Amino acid sequence: MSRLRVGFITTSFPLWPSSTSGPFVAQLVQQLAQHVHVTVLTPCTNQRVEVADSDFEVHCFRYAPRRWQILAHLPGGIPAALRNYPMSWLLLPGFLLTLFIAIWRLSRQVDLLHANWSVTGVLAGLVGFFSGTPVITTLRGEDFNRARKSKLYRYLLNMCLCLSQKITVVGEAMYRDLLVDSSIYRQKIVFFPNGVNETFTTIPPLYVQTNQTIEFLYLGNLISSKGVDVLLRACAGILDQGTWILEVAGFGPESDRLQALATDLKLQNRVRFSGGIPPERVPELMANSAVLVLPSYREGRSNVVLEGMAAGRVIVASDIPGVRELIRHGENGLLFKAGDPVDLAAVLRGVLEDGDLRQQLGAAARQWVIEQDLTWPAAARRYVALYREVRATRQADRS
């Protein structure tokens, strides 16, 4: 039997060695390629494309002269590009048209289309409607956050549900909300959690050492919704508490403002801004840290939290739905009120004071990830089974 051919469509994907665009997407694709033939379709960029040799193909489509291709692959994705570079709105019509054409061409070479995010799912669904190619769409936190705020995004989400044969969501809270809000499509909707690289589970566990320096780690884009300013203000409240350092690993439009804020708060000797970190260095960062802090105002199902849990690190995170389904406060991590630096400072102070608590929380977090089988190979197997189900259903409908 020939291998199933899957067209994997995404607006975030690492197209050069140091790229931080969609590393979780790339990890899923790497595992899918062990079972099916995968062709990734993604926008080109203003960088030189250098994709390492792999078991899958990557096709990037051009939508503007090279130096103007800034809509995708930046921190925060296309919405952030439109917000930070107003002139980029002029690129959007051409982007959507060329994406549609590229999906149409891809549909003629594959057995199934797997789209990521709702807007891409609508375009793939339209292609599938006319070409007969079945479509699966994966929705993430931003799809739901935007749909709550915008009638346009809500309309696009509904179109995506209508045009896709199956919809996968990566978070339990999103899954439950979608079943309630779009009950007529409930037979299409499935919950498929993301995974983590198994390397994280091999990182040595935390241990208590006298007079050790505790390293806090923030890992993610430097955009306003991530709440890194809240973390800095919380750190200013524990300057006299123990020996600690904060590493801020990431880049984005908020970078200069956050570094200026750190200076204003007299945190120069406590905070290290290390810029964007290639995915292959993330396990090293986790190994060197004791506490992973996620101060976001909103998240889907946070991949970095899953990685930190698998690494056996203490997770301190905002008490928001996408995190609450992973962290049980006081059992496998700690939660604080989103946007509240005083509450965050109190939690960090408690972590600094209690080495035994750090060990217990880190060990419980890792054990939970292992028990839930939250690895990328397991995630890929679930998707491949769904691909075959959808393909078989489409063939039966035609016969």
Image (tube, grey):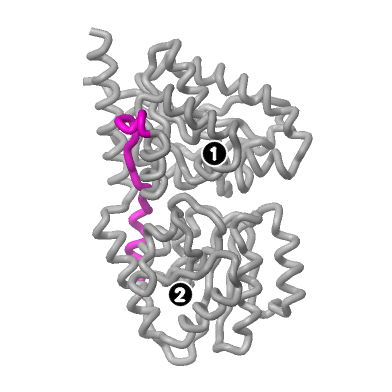
Tell which residue pokes out farthest to the top in this image: 399
- In the rendered view, does 318 fall on the left or right side of 368? right
Residue drawn at 59 percent across, 42 percent down: 149
Q: Nearer the viewer, residue 256 or 351?
A: 351
SS at badge 2: loop
Q: For the residue carrying disc 2, how many other residues have a C-alpha within 10 Å: few (<14), some (14-19), or many (20+)?
A: many
Amino acid at dot 1? Ala
Q: Which structural element holds mark 1?
A: helix
Q: Residues within 10 Å of mark 1 (few under 14, many from 20)?
A: some
Q: Is residue 111 above or below residue 330?
A: above
Q: Where does the C terminus fall, quadrant-wise?
A: top left
Q: Nearer the viewer, residue 58 or 216?
A: 216
Magenta span = 183-205
In the rendered image, which quarter is residue 187 located in? top left
* Disc on the earlier residue, 2 or 1: 1
Q: In the displayed image of the protein, which residue is found farthest to the bottom? A: 210
- Residue 49 in percent (x, y) is at 59, 36
Q: Is residue 339 left or right of residue 159?
A: right
- The residue sitting at 49% across, 46% down in the picture is 141
Q: Name the residue type under label 2.
A: Ala
Q: Say if 367 sits above or below 176 in the image.
A: below
Please name whichever residue, 188 or 126, is drawn nearer the observer in this view of the structure.
Answer: 188
Which quadrant of the rendered structure holds the N terminus?
Answer: top left
Can you give x and y, in whole percent of width and height, for residue 161 in the image?
Answer: 43, 28
Q: Is residue 116 left or right of residue 136?
A: right
- Let me know if residue 79 is in the magenta part: no
Residue under pointer 1? 147
Q: In this orientation, does residue 376 appear? A: yes
- Residue 290's tag is 2
Q: Position of residue 63 (x, y in %)?
A: 66, 25
Question: Foreground: 14 or 145?
Answer: 145
